[in-house]
DNA sequence: CTTTTTCTTGAACGAACCGTCAAGAAGTGA
DNA sequence: TCACTTCTTGACGGTTCGTTCAAGAAAAAG
């Protein structure tokens, strides 16, 4: 069956990408449908027709963000020094916080702002955090096998530490006049486990 | 000059304390003046008369929260094992997250939600984070002198690590089904520096 | 072409928002 | 008691919120 009727004037995927930027920067509650209309250049009727309502659109953008995070976690399994990969994930997070202050990590923002009142958003965030944690744990275990990390280190516990550290860096960097000052916190976290 | 006119029917300090709970739990934007009216049992006219507007009342509650945090940071300078004090501060944070899920740390919540658009709130959060950081650094230095922490540890860097860890624990705990699982992240953070 | 279907447009809706205000209540000072 | 001051009360205004909808536009199907 071929699809009939007037075609969409916008690309849905691209629209979600741009809506993601808005929700990421401003948060769920503070972003109004008027904001989205202005920033996306799409009138309310079309937005509601394509996505349902504000909450559904938000979940779509959050899922997209989570998918990006999953890709970053998966790249930890790539080749090269596992420990260097872990360090890169941490410094990338801090660099992002330095370059785009006031944006943070959308998963952390969502955990803080909407998770208490939104079980669907909670599931997405929980899964993304879980993937990040297990990706870090695997990478640390690989680094351990490669002799980059001391043998007595609890990789699971350290993965949780690093996950919390990433989220904490995003939070603290927002209030810091010079977020670069936090770089040595990453060194400190890794100094304790390197062989 | 003695104060004339009808006296307040409520205790201002107590009201700020209760308003703090509401803002802490729900955040700034999501808390309406109607919510405050209902939870505090004080009508709008009195609230505006006593505090000015919603933003001013919020800053009062944030300052109170920051003062509590400062007290916690100051208690790190108390007697007893400095390292044990540091550990207690971390485990207390996690316990709070376990006992009151969906509340987090009001400083971190504010850093995420309102700091990008509110320089006054930013100053309060920045100062509180600074006090926490320097309190942790002092405690670590004391622990180092007492031989509880290895001599080659950079106490400033590790203080920043622990500050970010506390904030990160609050964030990650919100999405975690069993926040207690994060306890070993604290162990991991301290295992790397103990003598 | 006509019909049918889908999308776009932008005005409009009820609800909720923050903040105000006039009237009454409850104190102090003389 | 009578002024005077301050606080309380709750209705109200102007704005913004998320959402809907009727009318017109643009494509496919026959």
Image (cartoon, coloured by chain):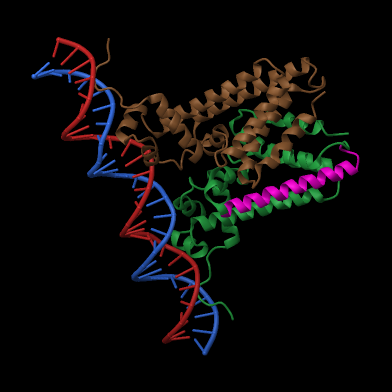
Chain colours: A brown, B green, C blue, D red
Q: Where is residue A14 shown, x and y percent of the image? A: 41, 26
Q: Position of residue B174 (x, y in %)?
A: 60, 34
On the question of residue A47 being in view, the answer is yes
Residue A160 belongs to magenta span? no
Closer-to-camera residue (B64/A168): A168
In percent of the image, x 52 and y 62: which residue is there? B51
In this orientation, which residue lies closer to the viewer: A126 or A152?
A152
Position of B46 relative to B22 (above/below):
below
Residue for point 81% across, 31% down: B192
Magenta: predominant secondary structure element? Answer: helix
Q: How many numbered marks are there?
A: 0
Q: Position of residue B86 (x, y in %)?
A: 78, 41
Towards the viewer: B104 or A138 = A138
Left or right: where B183 falls relative to A16: right
Residue B18 visible here: no
In the image: residue B155, left or right of residue A76: right
Is residue A119 rendered to the left or right of residue B66?
A: left
Q: Which residues are magenta?
A: B120-149
Where in the figure is residue B102, as x and y percent of width and height?
58, 38
Nearer to me, A12 or B65: A12
Q: Quadrant of the C terminus of chain A?
A: top right
Above or below B110: residue D28: above
Q: Is B138 a magenta residue?
A: yes
Q: Residue at x 77, y 15 (%)?
A: A146
* Quadrant housing the N terminus of chain A: top left
Residue C25 appears left or right of B57: left
């Amino acid at each position: 069956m071929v699809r009939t009727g007037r075609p969409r004037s916008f690309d849905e995927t691209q629209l979600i990408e741009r809506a993601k930027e808005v929700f990421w920067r401003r948060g769920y509650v503070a972003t109004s449908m008027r904001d989205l209309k202005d920033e996306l250049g799409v009138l309310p009727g079309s937005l509601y027709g394509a996505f349902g309502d504000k909450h559904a659109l938000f979940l779509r953008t959050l899922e997209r963000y989570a998918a990006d995070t999953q890709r970053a976690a998966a790249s930890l399994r790539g080749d090269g020094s596992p420990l260097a990969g872990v360090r890169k994930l941490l410094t990338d997070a801090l660099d992002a916080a330095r370059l785009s202050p006031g944006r943070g990590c959308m998963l952390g923002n969502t955990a803080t702002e909407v998770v208490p009142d939104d079980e669907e958003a909670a599931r997405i965030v929980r899964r993304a955090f879980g993937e990040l944690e297990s990706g870090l744990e695997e990478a640390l275990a690989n680094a351990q096998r490669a002799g980059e990390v001391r043998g007595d280190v609890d990789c699971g516990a350290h993965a949780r530490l690093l996950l919390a550290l990433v989220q904490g860096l995003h939070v603290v960097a927002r209030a810091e006049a010079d977020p670069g000052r936090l770089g040595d916190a990453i060194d400190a976290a890794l100094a304790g486990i390197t062989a």
